[in-house]
Amino acid sequence: MALACLGEIKSRVKGHHVYEYNYKVNEELKCFLQPDNNYSNNAIVVKSKDVVVGHIPEALAEKLFPLMKRWKLYQIKATITGEKRRAPEGTWVLGGGIELPCTYHLYGPKIHKCIVRNSLKK
């Protein structure tokens, strides 16, 4: 079955790993469920090969994690779109205050496009 791009989301990669990662703008990263994460039941880790770069922000991961777990989404890729930056003042939460702007590309069977888009609207 061929995968279709079901949507794109402009967001960021969060976490202290971002601070240490030597990234390139337009670099493509892969995202994986991380059900054994000690801090979140919905964690999705962002990696470059086997190197952890960070995580999808919690509010977005809460929507994407169930879609991946139920096989409505098969794959999420992140494309870095800019320079790393400090999170805006007052928004520091567990996971660090450094973020990396990116666009998340969502892939899965074309028949799930409406389900994915409706889940993201909630």
Image: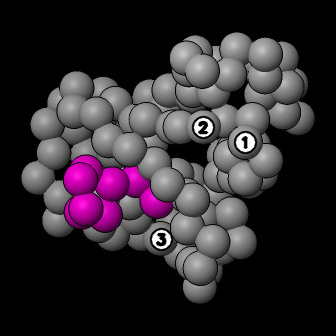
First in residue order: circle 2 vs circle 3: 2
Disc on res. 63: none
Mark 2, residues whose alpha carbon is within 10 Å: few (<14), some, or many (≥20)?
some
Tell me whether circle 2 and circle 1 mark residues in contact (CB < 8 Å): yes
Q: What residue is pinned by disc 1?
A: 71
Residue matched to label 3:
95
Q: For the view shown, which residue lies furthest in the bottom direction?
A: 38
Q: Secondary structure at mark 3?
A: loop
In the displayed structure, would residue 74 be above or below residue 3?
below
- The answer to whether marks 2 and 3 mark residues whose Cβ atoms lie closer than 8 Å is no
- Identity, as a three-letter code, of the amino acid under mark 3: Gly
Q: Earlier in the sequence, mark 3 or mark 1?
A: 1
Residue type, numbered disc 2: Tyr
Given the image, on which type of amino acid does mark 1 rest? Answer: Trp
102 left or right of 71 in image: left
Position in image of residue 89 (x %, y %): 48, 56
For the stretch drawn in magenta, the main secondary structure is strand
Q: Is residue 14 left or right of residue 91?
A: left
Q: Tell me where residue 23 appears, x and y as whole percent.
A: 15, 45
At x 68% / y 46%, what residue is drawn? 68
Name the residue at 45% across, 42% down. Answer: 12
Magenta part of the protein: which range? 45-52
User: Above or below — where is 118 with respect to 80?
Assistant: above
Residue 19 percent coordinates (x, y) = 23, 62
Q: Secondary structure at mark 2?
A: loop
Residue marked by disc 2: 74
Circles 3, 1 touching at the beta carbon (< 8 Å): no
